[in-house]
Amino acid sequence: MRILFLTHRPPFPPNKGDKIRSFNILTHLASRHDVYVASLIDDATDLKHAGQIRDVARAYLYERIDSPGRRLVALRAMAHGRPITVDYFYSRQLQTAIDAMLDKLDVDVVLCYSSPMADYVFRSRHAHGKLARAAKLMDLIDVDSYKWVQYAEAAPFWKAWIYRYEARTLAAYERRIARDFDRLFLVSEQERSYFPGGPVEHLHAFSNGVDLTYFSPNYTSRQRPAAPALVFTGVMDYWPNVEGVKWFARDIFPRIQASVPDVRLYVVGSRPTAEVRNLASDSIIVTGFTEDVRDYLAGASVCIVPLRIARGVQNKILEAMAMAKPVITTPQAFEGLQATPGEDIVVAHNEDGFAAAAIELLRDRERARRVGERARHCVERHYSWSDRLALLETWMSRRQ
């Protein structure tokens, strides 16, 4: 089959949640089909990876967009009652390049990765021709409109009204996608319940996976954090990560230190905000960008995921579990995960519970080892990428 794969960010390198999923989809499909990729690049460091994508795909089209310059786009979107997110990721230049490619190319499937990419179908001059004849699939990943509802609930009033606007306009846009696309995917069954307007028959759950060979308990770290070590991994300018780490450092970590004085907290991830950098101390290490998070995961006594704004399946949890590490998380970040609380993973419902769980696992190495082993077995059973992507192949071969 010929597949047009439209992604809001490049599907390489697989160094953050959305790119891990798109990378695995691309490599799987490209090993079996002719895949033509088009994406936006809003991070200049991704420009150097265009060659790797071209090595996998039949062709790769991209357009660089400047994040600061897109603020005017946001204002125009609001003036016309359109979702800010959709207009942020729309480029007339990329649309022109896609349409020019379609002038010479028939495609069997159009797979859009993230809701803004539907606009390249809706606005295409081939929308009622070649693209109408192709199977149209949308990987929403998460229900973005509901994400903005959550943001509005947690934000100060001067931001909350913008977030509510985005939630409302995106919900209408997601309903349009549901009407026009043949199949829609979300990362978990729980996420389906958040879709605006009620159940959609052609909306399916398609979970993330984890590379079980790459994230292995047998990995030998090039640098081991000082034990006992609590480790959090994630992009550190992403608000839910920032908020969660600040909450943990302020309200939970001091309680753990009172019982385990030599414990260290490692915050591992690129682009830490000033708020995150200001957390650094003798006992809190903010690493910034690291070439390989496995170096810190391998040395972790316990991995923590203290997210209070989270849905779907968290890659950071799967990666830690795959390396046989005990993980403590919140109910919000646990949602959507096929794992048994208390056995494969520990779910803490408040500050006291989080601190108590961390202290127990830091002190009881045998229990920590057992939870880690069960975590590894859990992801082996449920989160192999090959199993996940086999479902995608099945759905892709049938329009309805």
Image (tube, rainbow, N blue to C red):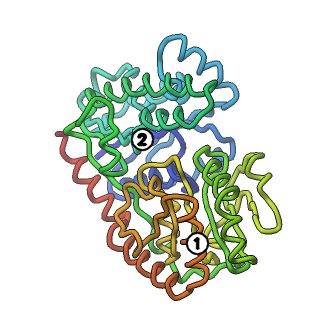
Compared across the picture, whether 152 is left or right of 378 comes to right
List x then y, in percent, for residue 40: 55, 36
Crowd rating for badge 1 (residues with CA inside 10 Å; few <14, some 14–19, many 20+): many
Query: Considering depth in this image, is 46 or 53 the residue closer to the camera?
Result: 46
- Residue corresponding to mark 2: 113
List x then y, in percent, for residue 194: 34, 39
Query: Considering depth in this image, is 252 or 238 the residue closer to the camera?
Result: 252
- Circle 2 sits in a helix, a strand or a loop, which is it? strand
- Residue corresponding to mark 1: 358
List x then y, in percent, for residue 95: 48, 25
Q: Residue at x 64, y 67 (%)?
A: 292
Above/below status of 221 relative to 392: below
Above/below status of 173 relative to 189: above
Q: How far apart are the alpha carbons under marks 2 and 1?
A: 37 Å
Above/below status of 29 relative to 108: below
Which residue is at the far right?
Answer: 282
Of the residues tagged 2 and 1, which is closer to the observer?
1
Q: Residue at x 38, y 40 (%)?
A: 140
Which residue is at the far top?
Answer: 79
Quadrant in the rendering for residue 102 = top left
Q: Residue at x 63, y 46 (%)?
A: 46
Quadrant holding the C terminus: top left
The answer to whether residue 96 is visible is no
Between discs 2 and 1, the one toward the N terminus: 2
Q: How many marks?
A: 2
Compared across the picture, whether 276 is left or right of 185 comes to right
Amino acid type of the residue tagged 2 in the rendering = Tyr
